[in-house]
Amino acid sequence: MSNEYRHVLVAVDLTKDSHKVLERAAQIAERNQAKLSILHTLEPLGFAYGGDIPMDLTSIQDQLDEHAKQRLSEIADGHVAKEDQHVLVGMPDTEIHRFAAEHEVDLIAVGSHGRHGFALLLGSTSTGVLHGARCDVLAVRVGKKGETDE
């Protein structure tokens, strides 16, 4: 019998809920003996601010990139090999679809939750990922109202 999934991609927003999404995806990857990759997408700063800021944002973007890599590593270490941890700059759903196509991903796991802070991304992103995906998408329910923190 062939395995259902060969490459599982976890798309995370780096909030505390990312662990829950990764754990669910890791279980599926393990059951299918599939490769597991994790991805976070940073929106380009110029885009986030309408593109008309009269200063060079490169060093700030680099700092954000470095911070995102560290945070992703904190979440992923122990589950995902270093070379399979990715931080990309761009529009989240576009970058997730591109990565999935280029790396033969057959399951994308995303968190689906209420919005707060930069986590605003994944509320709308999970919808965008679902609509353009050429493979299965698992929306892991996280951060429901009324839930208390662990």
Image (cartoon, rainbow, N blue to C red):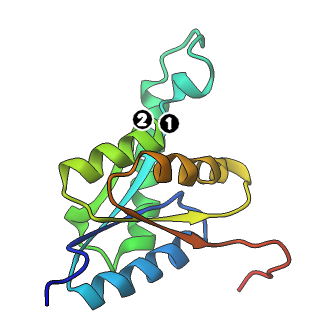
For the residues bearing labels 2 and 1, Cβ distance under 8 angstroms:
yes
Which residue shows up at 57% across the image and 51% down it? 127
| Amino acid at the residue labelled 1 | Glu
User: Is 110 on the left or on the right of 119, as rendered?
Assistant: left
| Amino acid at the residue labelled 2 | Gly
Q: Position of residue 70 (x, y in %)?
A: 41, 60
Q: Position of residue 20 (x, y in %)?
A: 54, 78
**Image position of 105 with respect to 138: above or below:** above
Q: Mark 2 vs mark 1: which is more N-terminal? A: 1
Q: Is the residue marked by circle 1 packed among few (<14), some (14-19), or many (20+) residues within 10 Å?
A: some
Disc 1 on helix, strand or loop? loop
Which residue shows up at 46% across the image and 43% down it? 92
**Image position of 117 with respect to 148: above or below:** above
Report the residue marked by disc 2.
90
Disc 2 on helix, strand or loop? loop
Separation (CA) of disc 2 from disc 1: 5 Å
Q: Where is residue 139 in the image (x, y as percent from the top left)?
A: 53, 67
Which residue shows up at 82% across the image and 72% down it? 145
Q: In terms of image quadrants, where is residue 74?
A: bottom left
Report the residue marked by disc 1.
43
